[in-house]
C-alpha cells in the first residue's frame, strides 16, 4: 500500500459496504431524470437557447457519466458548469457590466486552477486500491490538506457568487424589502444552493480528516449529483416562473429581462 495512506486494522468502518449508497445515488439520479424529462423537453423546445442552456444540458447529463466512469475530470466539469450558471445569473443582475465579467473570469481561474491541481494530485495518490477487507485506508495529513484546500475554495467561490447577487439586489431595491418575484427567486435559489454546497464541502473536508477514504469519496459523489440536480431544477423552475399566470406584481417582467440578457433562459 502507498505510503500516502495510513492503514488501521479492525476499524469500526472497515466493513462498511458503500455499494448500497452508490446504487441509491444512481437510482436517485435516474429517477429524477425520468421524472423531470417532460419538463426538460418543454424547456429545451420552448426556451431561448444561449450559453445558459448549454450549461444546463451539461449539468443534466454529465452526472450519469461521472457515476458510471468514476472520473475526477467529469466531476470537476459538472461542478464548474453548475457554478457557471449562477455566475451568469449574477452577471445578468449586474446588467452585464464589463468589470463584473472580468472579475468573474479572474475569480474562476483563481479558484479553479489551484483546486483542480490539488484534486489531481490527490487522484494520483489513490491510483492504486486504497482499501482492502479488514483494513481502512486513511489519507495522510498532506493528502487531507489537498482535499481541504480544493473543497474550501469551492465554499469560498459559492459564497462570493451569493454575495455579489445579494449586494446588487439589496442596493438596486434600496434595502431588504424586495418586491420583484424574479429577484426573490434568484436569491432563494442561490441561498439554497450555497447552503447545500457548504454542507457537502464541509462534510467532505471533515471525513478526509477523520474517516476512511471510501466515505469521503462517496460524499464527494453525492455532492456532484445532488448539486447538479438542484441547479437543473432551479434553472427550469426559474424559466417556468414567468410563464405561470400568478398575478403577482413585479417591477420587471422576465420577457423584458430576457430581451436584455439573452444568454440567461
Image: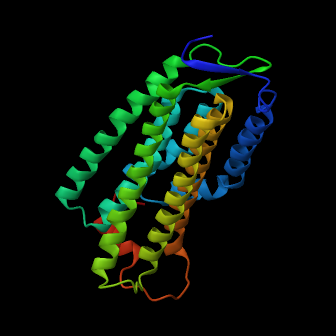
- Residue drawn at x 27%, y 66% as measured from the top left: 94
The quarter of the image holding the N terminus is top right
The quarter of the image holding the C terminus is bottom left
- Residue drawn at x 61%, y 27% as measured from the top left: 70
Quick check: 107 left or right of 162?
left
Residue 11 sits in quarter: top right
Where is residue 125? Give x, y as percent.
Answer: 52, 18
- Residue drawn at x 72%, y 54% as measured from the top left: 35
Q: Is residue 49 visible?
A: no
Where is residue 113? Give x, y as percent.
Answer: 33, 33
With respect to residue 69, does 103 lie above or below? below
With respect to residue 123, does 247 lie above or below? below
Q: Nearer the viewer, residue 51 or 133?
A: 133
Q: Residue furthest left?
A: 99
Residue 205 sits in quarter: top right
Q: Nearer the viewer, residue 126 or 23?
A: 126
- Residue drawn at x 55%, y 65% as measured from the top left: 237
Where is residue 27? Give x, y as percent.
Answer: 75, 42
With respect to residue 203, does 238 lie above or below? below
Where is residue 213? Give x, y as percent.
Answer: 64, 29
Q: Is residue 262 visible?
A: yes
Quick check: 254 left or right of 31?
left
Amino acid at each position: 500500500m502507498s505510503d500516502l495512506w495510513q492503514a488501521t486494522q479492525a476499524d469500526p468502518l472497515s466493513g462498511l459496504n458503500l455499494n448500497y449508497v452508490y446504487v441509491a445515488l444512481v437510482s436517485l439520479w435516474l429517477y429524477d431524470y425520468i421524472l423531470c424529462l417532460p419538463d426538460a423537453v418543454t424547456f429545451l423546445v420552448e426556451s431561448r437557447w444561449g450559453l445558459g442552456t448549454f450549461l444546463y444540458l451539461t449539468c443534466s447529463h454529465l452526472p450519469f457519466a461521472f457515476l458510471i466512469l468514476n472520473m475526477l475530470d467529469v466531476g470537476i466539469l459538472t461542478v464548474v458548469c453548475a457554478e457557471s450558471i449562477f455566475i451568469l445569473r449574477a452577471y445578468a443582475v449586474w446588467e452585464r457590466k464589463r468589470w463584473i465579467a472580468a472579475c468573474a473570469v479572474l475569480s474562476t481561474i483563481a479558484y479553479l486552477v489551484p483546486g483542480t491541481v490539488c484534486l489531481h494530485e490527490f487522484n494520483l495518490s489513490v491510483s492504486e486500491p486504497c482499501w482492502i477487507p479488514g483494513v481502512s485506508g486513511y489519507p495522510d495529513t498532506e493528502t487531507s490538506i489537498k482535499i481541504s484546500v480544493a473543497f474550501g475554495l469551492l465554499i469560498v467561490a459559492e459564497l462570493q457568487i451569493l454575495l455579489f447577487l445579494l449586494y446588487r439586489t439589496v442596493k438596486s431595491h434600496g434595502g431588504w424589502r424586495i418586491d420583484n418575484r424574479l429577484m426573490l427567486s434568484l436569491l432563494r435559489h442561490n441561498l439554497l444552493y450555497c447552503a447545500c454546497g457548504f454542507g457537502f464541502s464541509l462534510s467532505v473536508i471533515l471525513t478526509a480528516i477523520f474517516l476512511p477514504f471510501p466515505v469521503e469519496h462517496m460524499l464527494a459523489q453525492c455532492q456532484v449529483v445532488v448539486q447538479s440536480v438542484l441547479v437543473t431544477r432551479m434553472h427550469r423552475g426559474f424559466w417556468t416562473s414567468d410563464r405561470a399566470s400568478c398575478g403577482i406584481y413585479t417591477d420587471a417582467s422576465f420577457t423584458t429581462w430576457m430581451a436584455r440578457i439573452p444568454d440567461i433562459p
